[in-house]
Image (cartoon, grey):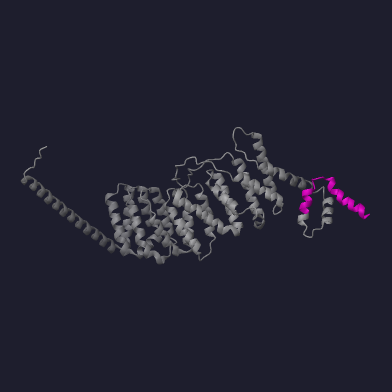
Amino acid sequence: MGVQSNTTLKASPRVSTRKRSTTLQHLIDLDSNGNKIANNNIGSSSSSSSSPFNSEHEEIPSTVSYCTFVFAFTEYECLKQQKLKRHKLLQLLSFVKTNKNSVPVQVLSSLISMISANLFRPLPPPSNPSITADFPDDEDPMSAFSPVWSHLQLVYDILIRLVINNDPKVLRQYIDNQFVINLLALFQSEDPRERDSLKNVYHRIYSRFTFYRAFMRKSMNDVFLHYVFETERHCGIRELLEIWGSIINGFTVPLKEEHKLFLMRVLIPFHKTKGMQAYHRQLAYCVSQFVQKEPVLGGIVVRGILRYWPVTNCQKEVLLIGELEELVEDIDPDQYRKLALPLCNQITRCLNSWNSQVAERALYVWNNEHFVKMISVAMEEVFPVVVEGMEKNLKWHWSKSVRQLTENVKVMLEEMDPILYSKCLQEIDLRGSKAHQAEIKRKQNWDRIEMAAARHQYLQPPHFICV
């Protein structure tokens, strides 16, 4: 009887040929006691109920193998094969979604290989190499939609599902440092859809793979430094800064020295780049997060922005004025006196700008309560500079709206300290009269010199040279 029973157990796999092999192996992996006889009994008793699952597992390797082939979407390729690959990618995505934490190791390895074959490819050369992304935040000059996106979109969806649904310790042997670096290099893609998917995948890896966080931060810093100090061209700076904004939001207080150095050596120099308008909103958010966590850093940030202030770019000036206004609200009040004068010097230069947008934006700063509070701390130092700038605008500025706004600010300043304001006006008049007298004296001196030269030329006989 024992022989017959043994023969029955061995024959059960033969009846189903290879259709049971993957399922049996899967059951063996799940059985921690390694009881092979029990597994065979379970497989034979539940063969009818597990048939769809078995067939699905059997089709996965061939599906993954087919999806490894990369289409270039040229006119010479077969459209049916492209559609077939998309259909198979949809099957893989459905498989990954339904099998949470239960993807076999062999399938997981082949899936990562397929993902690498599709994603890690040489990117096409830039469509416009001379462009510097000098555009507003809602415009993306470096956008070129890739024809391969219909396949890439599904590959990114499969990858993010694998990252979310599987244990990072299991994925660690497949998603290593080189895999992360290859993902980071893809941020150079000109397709904004791919960069957005990359942002989600990269951030998910950062949040779940805690053992890679330091390496991923350093890799992003290298990209930033290369952009700021060498090339000033990169398509994915906006997306990388969005990732950093989320990372900074999770920093604990007090901040580590590494994070403070990132603020001073990377984020602040970002304000000098030509393409700052394209990612200024994300950059300002990162900087404000640092100042909100440690208000003492506000002084370093304000001085850094003033050091990189643009000379001829009016759009950048408008953006930086707005950023400074927001930073003033989070700065430590103990630093008001130190920052009041340099900040007011720059704001005054801006309100005297011949560009009406810059001048108006600088005048609107005076509606900010925190800014006015900063000025009130150092009125003796700040008022002479501000009052002189106001008087220049009222006399010389060409824009009627700028003159009207200047008049409103002047009324507010007079109400703050009328005695000091009148004193500043007297000093301005005194300096003007002294300058006028100096100009008259200088003109008189030149007149005397010209008369002496003319008299000397009249008295001295002419010299003739014979040739």
Q: Position of residue 144 (x, y in %)?
A: 52, 40
Given the current orientation, which residue lies at the most extreme front position? 467
Question: Position of 132 compared to 449: left or right?
Answer: right
**Quarter-of-image position of residue 300:** bottom left
Q: Nearer the viewer, residue 331 or 254?
A: 254
Can residue 103 be seen? no
Q: Quadrant of the N terminus?
A: bottom right
Q: Nearer the viewer, residue 362 or 412?
A: 362
Question: Position of 339 compared to 218: left or right?
Answer: left
Q: Quadrant of the C terminus?
A: top left
Given the current orientation, which residue lies at the most extreme top position? 76
Q: Position of residue 314 (x, y in %)?
A: 38, 48
Question: Position of 142 compared to 175: left or right?
Answer: left
Residue 374 part of the magenta-drawn span: no
Q: Position of residue 40 (x, y in %)?
A: 83, 53
Q: Nearer the viewer, residue 377 or 233?
A: 233
Can residue 79 be seen? yes
Range drawn in magenta = 1-27
Question: Position of 34 compared to 254: left or right?
Answer: right
The residue lying at 18 percent from left, 56 percent from top is 438
Residue 21 part of the magenta-drawn span: yes
The residue lying at 14 percent from left, 51 percent from top is 446
Q: Main secondary structure of the magenta part?
A: helix
Q: Position of residue 274 (x, y in %)?
A: 42, 48
